[in-house]
Amino acid sequence: MKKQKRITITDIAKLAGVSKTTASLVLNGRGKEMRVADETILRITSIAQQYQYQPNIHARSLRDNRSYALGLVIPDITNYGFASVAYELEVLCREAGIQLLISCTDENAAQETLAIEHLLSRQIDGLIVASCLQSDFEYQRLSQQIPVVLFDRYFEGTTLPFVATDAITATQQLIADITSIDQPSLLDEFYFLGGQATLSPTKDRLLGFTQGLTQADVNLKPEWIIHGHYHPSSGYEMFGSLCARLGRPPKFVFTSACGLLEGVLRYLSQNKLLQQSVYLAGFDDHYLYDSLSVPIDTIAQNNPALASHCFRLIMALINHNDLETHQIFIPAEIRKRH
């Protein structure tokens, strides 16, 4: 089958009986501004619609010195929280005529570096990243070339702009509320299953957890804190090892991410322990939790707000606008089901 020739601005100008300059002005939305007659604007746009004209993005990029593409680097696209934010960001980008390029790192520093290199080769205008690196050195250096916004994870003492959830406040409140259900003095175990101990989300959620116990006058025991990595398999392994050590399921468990809770639920299901009296709570929420027979108290992140603030910051940096606030913590919502 012979490939149909794509119509150009020159073709449209000939069909409309106008100059190429006039056709270009109209198709770039500047017809009114440049006082092109309404009849001429209508004639040009009608021909463009009839022949399904699409502007040449390469020509636009060369003219504006921009690629109209943003890079988003996240650890895991199957993670519900990251997937939700990626979706919200993609909608914002689409509405602004920008393409969002997504790369996943699998929590691997080498893979993260490679993903950044690939995105840079696409000449992205800016980068939004949830990093698994241990310092912001590379991103400080990169920010001299293109705008960089940290998302979900931030580095202690960083001067880079970031958007993250205020995990400490919500976690402290939830844990304090849970421990007040029972007599705090009699609560003899409350386990925290977390991701990598070096990451800011783990640190913040653990701090909120410990402050919640302190608020409820519960003495934290070091063995209650267990770290793994942010993947369902890690939640499964940590909970399974805990059950084996105790000889029974634990009484109270807080998981620091949705994926970890998924692993815990899988272990309970496979070992027919769902009817055991385990008090489950966790950071991150999922709409399916409302349908489970097992009640789970959760902390829901405001994913639309996270995406909106990331987009606002990166676009302000791209357009060389001053930032009123460049490090933002978004409040989270407690959802109780017990």
Image: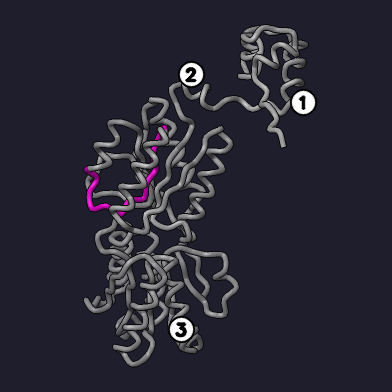
| Eye-nearest disc, 3 or 2 | 2
| Eye-nearest disc, 3 or 1 | 1
First reached walking from the N terminus: tag 3 or tag 2: 2
Q: Are marks 3 and 1 in contact (CB under 8 Å)?
A: no
Q: Residue at x 53, y 47 (%)?
A: 88
Closer to the camera, 222 or 266? 266
Mark 3 residue crowding within 10 angstroms, few (<14) / some (14–19) / many (20+): some
Q: Which amino acid, by three-letter code, is at mark 1?
A: Gln
Q: Which mark is residue 156?
A: none
Q: Is mark 2 on a helix, strand or loop?
A: helix
Up the image or down, 81 lies above or below 98; here it is below
Q: Which mark is residue 50?
A: 1
Q: How far apart are marks 1 and 2 (CA)?
A: 26 Å
Q: What element carries label 3?
A: helix
Q: Mark 3 points at which residue?
A: 268
Residue 329 visible, this angle: no
Residue placed furthest toward the bottom = 247
Up the image or down, 142 lies above or below 20; here it is below
Secondary structure predominantly adopted by residues drawn in magenta: loop
Residue 174 visible, this angle: yes
As for residue 135 lying within the magenta part, the answer is yes
First reached walking from the N terminus: tag 1 or tag 2: 1
